[in-house]
Amino acid sequence: MLFITNIVFLILGCFLDVSTIQLVFVPIVLPVMIKMGIDPVHFGVVIVLNMMIGLSTPPFGMLLFIVTGLSKAKMKDVIRSCCVHRPLHRGPVSHHLHPRPRAVDPKMMGYKPGL
């Protein structure tokens, strides 16, 4: 289920603004993920990464237009430089398969929830 949610938010990130996704879709999906036993922190990290990748992906790619305007570079140069980093995004996004080891790290360092 987290994989499907991952793909849906990646596609939504390509077409919608981040604030729209956060205000409309996250409150709908978050209770379902909590009922399924997914850590809310892990879910938040997955959503933020998907929105970041979606904002830098055509067809709209709002971040592409911002970077093009600020750097005065051509759009094709910005897209080419973003495509170089695409394989690096696969690692953090694919960590949805093993959420538990990442949620255990703070507890291993002595963090006690609820204090």
Image (cartoon, grey):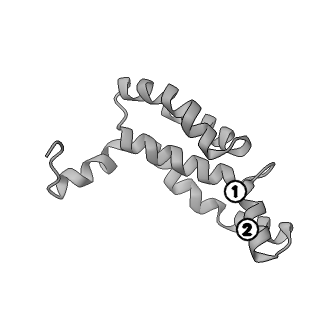
Question: Where's residue 15, x and y in %?
Answer: 74, 41
The CA distance from mark 1 to mark 2 is 10 Å
Give SS at disc 1.
loop
Secondary structure under tag 2 reads: helix
Badge 2 is on which residue? 67
Residue 98 drawn at (x, y percent): 39, 43
Q: In front here: 56 or 4?
A: 56
First in residue order: circle 1 vs circle 2: 1
Front-lying residue, 83 or 44 = 44
Can residue 4 be seen by looking at this rendering?
no
**Amino acid under disc 1:** Ser
The quadrant holding residue 62 is bottom right
The label number, if any, that marks residue 112 in the structure image: none
Q: Is residue 78 visible?
A: yes
Q: Residue at x 44, y 24 (%)?
A: 32
- The residue indicated by pointer 1 is 56
Disc 1 to disc 2: CB gap under 8 Å: no
Which kind of residue does numbered mark 2 sit on? Val
Residue at left offset 49%, top offset 45%: 46
The structure residue drawn at horizontal position 18% and vertical position 58%, both measured from the top left corner, is 109
